[in-house]
Image (cartoon, coloured by chain):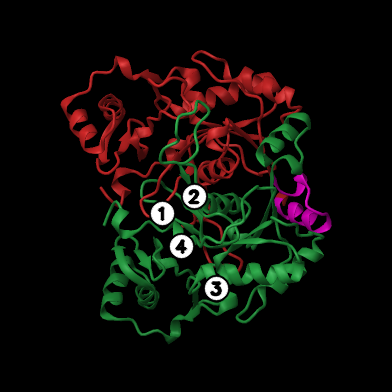
Chain colours: A green, B red
Amino acid sequence: MAKRRQSRTASKNAPTAKSGVSLFRLPGLPEIHCGDNLSEQITNAARKARIHFKNGDILVVAQKIISKAEGAVVRLSTIEPSPQAQAIAERQKKDPRLIEVILQESRRLVRTDPVLIAETRHGYVCANAGVDHSNVPGDDAVTLLPRDPDRSAKNLASALRKRSRKRIAVIISDTFGRPWRLGLTDVAIGASGVPVLHDLRSTRDRDGKPLTATVLAVADELASAAGLLMAKAEGFPVVLIRGYRYKPSSEPAAKIIRPASEDLFR
Amino acid sequence: MAKRRQSRTASKNAPTAKSGVSLFRLPGLPEIHCGDNLSEQITNAARKARIHFKNGDILVVAQKIISKAEGAVVRLSTIEPSPQAQAIAERQKKDPRLIEVILQESRRLVRTDPVLIAETRHGYVCANAGVDHSNVPGDDAVTLLPRDPDRSAKNLASALRKRSRKRIAVIISDTFGRPWRLGLTDVAIGASGVPVLHDLRSTRDRDGKPLTATVLAVADELASAAGLLMAKAEGFPVVLIRGYRYKPSSEPAAKIIRPASEDLFR
């Protein structure tokens, strides 16, 4: 019903924010530090930008600021590299302390050369187990992925709802590589309030034939859409998605992780 | 400069289509048949919907209608399955003629069970080599991927430019699976006018540190964003993306294909 109404609206009017989906950067967010109250920072920035949250708004938040707020930051000067880390670092000409942090964040190494591809403690497979030194102040500090990004998303969504009195969904995104395609895309590593996987398998196509094997990774597509506006170097770690119709859901982003039994390469 | 202006605008005004990116479905497109002039169909549908194209608009077009317009459709009744196709079909309980078409579209099989993952003649790695029987009228017909999706995108962009006198970029999208993540996301298999990979490696982060290994798969993120509005069963195969700032580019989507030498699993 909602979707049919949307298409009727679109056919009668010129494009407006109401007939489709809109994405906006949240400007004016300060550098985030350990212990910062992100819901307060986001609400303040939105108020200054005269952005009034609405029910159904989706905030896509870059992993980096969640990690900073939660203190998921490690100073390399505190790290003692293991012999394994030293061996890998020598081959890759990298800082052995950085490699050590990556190894500590990994529960399985998919590949070590030419880059470390690891399965993180959460089960995400990505380069360097998500350990990153860009956009972290100082030469010495690296960020880790949040310990429990679904919980982080849930907490942030809940705090934003209390402050705004609006139902706001949260996706925590990071940029991951892909085995067969170059370049990174943004994916969801934490989610609260949006459907994560949209199963179309029970529906039928326009000709009445059942749609087989069509499960859309909605949370990843939302993260990718927002990624278009999160120019990495420019500090827009929060993007608002408005107008996307969805059924509120409590699915965690961890649901996207392909079980080991279905992993094509294990 | 442009980006700074954008963020200033956003901080002064409430969200409008001008301060961010907007996505709209193109309603009213008829069922596409072999030989149809897609640029005409799209222009007509846009006119009826009172959508006026602007310079810089990006049209994301589902592969399915490109294939139909180009006649990349095969009737299974014309196919004689090989013994290899029959063997796979028996294990998977599928139509051996469908498997035969998939094998003919493949230049390498990555995996045969439980689903066929193949490298297509173009080099794309996806389930069933992109052969699909959903949203194709009749029980007997399946679509193949367009023979040269980058050329299809280029031709469509050029025809749309002639009709609208606006610089319109085109992305041809399809939904692909991923090895480590469940669900499909939309990716670009053809592109004309937009950057396909955005290399941030020469830029620096907010602290002046070089951003290493940050190449964004922009065309894939655009395809994924549009995928949010292309509800598969409902016939919205064209989505307009407006407001995304980019440098016009002639990069083909084929540039996203990871070279065999860098493929993690070859």
Q: Residue at the spot x=58%, y=58% of the render?
A: A249
Q: Nearer the viewer, residue B250 or B243?
A: B243
Secondary structure of the residue carrying tag 1 is loop
Q: Do badges 4 and 2 share one subunit?
A: yes
Q: Dot 2 corresponds to which residue?
A: A217
**Residue B36 visible in the displayed image:** yes
Q: Residue at the spot x=41%, y=28% of the render?
A: B133
Local packing at callout 3 (Cα closer than 10 Å; few below 14, some 14-19, many 20+) is many
From the viewer's perspective, tell me whether residue A112 is left or right of residue A149.
left
Which chain is indicated by disc 1?
B
Q: Which mark is residue B201?
A: none
Q: Say above or below: B89 vs A129.
A: above
Which chain is indicated by disc 2?
A
From the viewer's perspective, tell me whether residue A45 is left or right of residue B62.
right
Magenta residue check for B12: yes
Q: Which mark is residue A254?
A: 4
> The disc labelled 2 sits on which kind of residue?
Ala
Q: Dot 1 corresponds to which residue?
A: B181
Of labels 3 and 2, earlier in sequence is 3
| Residue A179: percent from left, percent from top | 36, 50
Task: Specify the segment rendered in magenta.
Answer: B3-21
Secondary structure of the residue carrying tag 2 is loop
Local packing at callout 2 (Cα closer than 10 Å; few below 14, some 14-19, many 20+) is many
